[in-house]
Every structure is written in C-alpha cells, then in structure tokens.
Image (cartoon, rainbow, N blue to C red):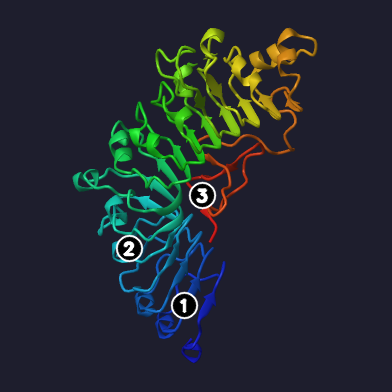
C-alpha cells in the first residue's frame, strides 16, 4: 500500500480479509474507505487512526467487528456501521462533533472498556438525515439526566428500538426527545405503558410507526392533532382492545356546539393497523356531535391486517376520500364488508380499489408478513430509509435489528 499513498478512495467490499494490514496507515490522503461486507473482520488496525484526512468510513455488514477507535479521525464526517452485529464500542465517537452521518448506534454494555452509551451522542449536533438507535443495556444515571437528541435539528428520520423491554423504557424515551423538525419516527418494542408527551410537539412529523409495544393499553390521545402527519402505522400493540375518540384528538365535551371546526388528522393519507390481537372496537363519532368535526379529509389508503377480533369500522371512514381499502386476515371485518349485496358493502362501494383476500391469499409466493418486531416506515424525500421486506404499503426500517440507511 505504500506505493498508493496518494490514494483518495479505497473500496474493499466483501473481501476475504480477517485483518487489515497496518500499512494502511500510510495512505494519509485517503478520504473514503469502504470495508463493508467483510464478515470475518474482527478489528481495525490502530494505524487507521493515522488517516486524519478520512471523511467517510463504511463498515456496513462487518458482522464480526467488536470495536472501532475513531478518536483521531478528526475530519470524519460519515460513519456507517449498520448490521455490525457484534459492535459494542465506537471509542471516541463523542469527540467527532462535526460528524454529519451516522446510520446506527447500539447502546450496549460489556467488555473491558464498557460499551456504547447514549450520552456519547449528546454533542453530535451536526448529525443529519437518518439515525437508528438500538437500546440494549441499562442507562446510567447521568444518561437519564441528559437531553440526547433535542439539539439535532438536521436529523429528519429517527428509529428507536428497545430490546430490554423494562418499565424504565419510559424514562429512557423521555430523554430521547428529538428536535421539533423531525419528519419520520419509528418506535419498536417499547415496554412503557404510555408514550412520552414530547410526541405531541412534533408538528413537522410526516411518518409515524408504533410497533410491538407490549405495555401500551391505549393509543396516544394527541395523534389526531399532529398537523403534518401523512402516514401512520400501528402494529403489535396487543393490549389495546379499543380505539376511542381520543385517538382522533377529540377532547371530552367537544361536540357540535363548539364554535370552531376541529380537523382530526388534517393531512393523513395512509393508515395501517395490523397484528392487534385484542382490538375489538373502533369507536366512531356520534352523528349529532360531528357537525363541527372533520376527520381525515385526505385519507387515501387504509389497511386492516390481522385484526381478528375487530367487529366493525367507524362510519366516519366512509366520509373520507378513500381510494384503496385492504383487509387481510381479519375475518369479522371481511365478512361484514365483503358480501357483495350486503348493507355494509354499500357504504364502501365508492372506493375504487377494495382488496379482501382470504387469509394471506393474494401475496406473492414466498412472501408473508414478517415478524412485527420490525418497525415500518414510508420512504420520505431526503430521509432515504429503504429495505422492502413487507409486501403491502410500507417499507421496513428494522429488519433483524434496524434499518439499512442509504448513504
């Protein structure tokens, strides 16, 4: 490598390397280094710290890598470590205050040097684009007193994945309040009984996914008030048995006597409710109390999947401009609305596209709904989170653990 010391870009994808030679430290002009897909690579040589001009380091899918040391990489702007399943420590990451892209960050314990902690992200306020945080270890007291994400105005998409599933999840989530400019949020495997109040302040939020949250018994009452929300996915909240009017953001006593018009979910276009084992009732708004209430005026697509106990859908849905209705693995709903000449069928006859297959019939061969520990998120402009695993209306942002964020 000495002969290539003027090299600016080095890409060694899926190479049979178990180690990188120390001579890589001689490539002092290197700006871009991509070692992605080297499954057997367990560590980087200390000489990587000599690459002080390095701006991009890609280690995506280096599954055996346990630690990396970035303390001396003072010019590093882009660090990609997604699917580095054994990576417990990014040593010195708190010093990279000019870091602009970090795809994933695992909060882990263990090892002689400890592991990644949430507090290490506190001062990385130049981060932008998308970030997935997986929380696997107990936070320290200091971390519980730190606002980790609030000053990161350029993070547009955030995935929070809780693997511990303890009652402390609510305390952790409170400290992960993002900047109000956030556009996309996915929360998965959260064990708290209620969600943090800061969700109600995300007035720029366009996409929200809540999945596999075993402690949640009721949906947040402020969702209908999120002014910019366009896509909502709710999955695997198995304790929720009823969706009431509070889901719409309608406050107690708010009726047709109110002088002003209230618009619930003013920009919502896509709504998906799936894998809700206990959900039996979805409450509507009484006819006499709905004159000054407008609900989901831009709703375009509705999917009801694997809600086997759900008895009916609220009538306000049939006043929305729905273009696509997809009902799957929800037998009561299918029987109620699927009869061609039935009374309930006439309510939905205006919808151009209605799909109500038996079970999983109609999906492509070999494709099934994946484990709903994944969290689902639509693709947003400027927040390029892809990984098309599910065959329906959404993309998966967390397959196995978390998303592959495109660079």
SS at circle 1 = loop
Q: Quadrant of residue 13?
A: bottom right
Image height check: is 57 above or below 193? below
Spot occupied by residue 78 in the image (x, y as percentages of width and height): 44, 66
Q: Nearer the viewer, residue 75 or 381?
A: 381
Q: Quadrant of residue 115?
A: bottom left
Residue linked to disc 1? 31
Q: Are marks 2 and 1 in contact (CB under 8 Å)?
A: no
**Which of the two discs, 2 and 1, labels the residue nearer the N terminus?**
1
From this viewpoint, is residue 374 visible?
Answer: no
**Which of the two discs, 2 and 3, labels the residue nearer the N terminus?**
2
Q: Nearer the viewer, residue 112 or 358?
A: 358
Spot occupied by residue 25 in the image (x, y as percentages of width and height): 40, 82
Tell me: 128 left or right of 346. left
Q: Residue at x 47, y 41 (%)?
A: 205
Q: Residue at x 41, y 18 (%)?
A: 251
Q: Residue furthest left?
A: 141
Residue linked to disc 3? 403
Q: Residue at x 29, y 58 (%)?
A: 123
Image height check: is 55 above or below 256? below
Label 2, label 1: how many angstroms apart (C-alpha)? 18 Å
Label 1, label 3: how many angstroms apart (C-alpha)? 25 Å
């Amino acid at each position: 490598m000495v002969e290539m010391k003027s090299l600016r870009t080095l890409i060694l994808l899926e190479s049979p390397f178990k180690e990188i030679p120390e001579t890589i430290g001689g490539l002092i002009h290197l700006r871009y280094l991509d070692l992605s897909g080297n499954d057997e690579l367990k560590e980087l040589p200390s000489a990587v710290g000599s690459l002080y001009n390095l701006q991009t380091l890609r280690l995506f899918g280096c599954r055996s890598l346990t630690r990396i040391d970035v303390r001396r990489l003072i010019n590093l702007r882009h660090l990609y470590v997604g699917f580095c399943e054994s990576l417990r420590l990014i040593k010195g990451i708190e010093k990279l205050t000019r870091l602009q892209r970090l795809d994933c960050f695992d909060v882990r314990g263990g090892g002689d040097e400890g592991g990644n902690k949430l507090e290490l992200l506190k001062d990385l306020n130049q981060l932008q684009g998308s970030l997935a945080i997986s929380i696997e270890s107990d936070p320290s007291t200091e971390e519980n007193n730190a606002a980790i994400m609030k000053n990161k105005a350029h993070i547009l998409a955030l995935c929070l994945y809780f693997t511990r599933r303890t009652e402390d999840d609510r305390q952790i989530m409170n400290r992960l309040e993002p900047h109000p400019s956030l556009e996309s949020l996915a929360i998965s495997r959260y064990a708290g009984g209620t969600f943090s109040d800061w969700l109600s302040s995300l007035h720029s939020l366009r996409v929200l996914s809540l999945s596999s949250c075993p402690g949640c018994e009721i949906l947040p009452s402020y969702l209908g008030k999120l002014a910019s929300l366009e896509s909502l996915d709710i999955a695997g909240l198995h304790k929720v048995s009823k969706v009431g009017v509070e889901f719409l953001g309608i406050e107690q006593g708010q009726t047709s006597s109110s002088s002003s018009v209230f618009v619930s979910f003013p920009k919502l276009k896509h709504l998906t409710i799936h894998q809700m084992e206990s959900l039996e009732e979805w409450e509507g708004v009484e006819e006499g109390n709905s004159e000054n209430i407008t609900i989901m005026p831009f709703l375009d697509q509705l999917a009801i999947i694997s809600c086997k106990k759900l008895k009916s859908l609220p009538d306000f849905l049939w006043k929305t401009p729905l273009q696509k209705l997809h009902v799957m693995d929800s037998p009561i709903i299918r029987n109620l609305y699927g009869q061609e000449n039935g009374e309930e069928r006439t309510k939905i006859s205006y919808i151009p596209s209605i799909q109500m297959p038996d079970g999983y019939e109609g999906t492509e061969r070999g494709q099934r709904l994946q484990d709903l520990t994944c969290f689902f998120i639509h693709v947003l402009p400027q927040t390029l989170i892809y990984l098309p695993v599910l065959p329906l209306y959404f993309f998966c942002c967390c397959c196995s653990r978390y998303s592959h964020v495109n660079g």
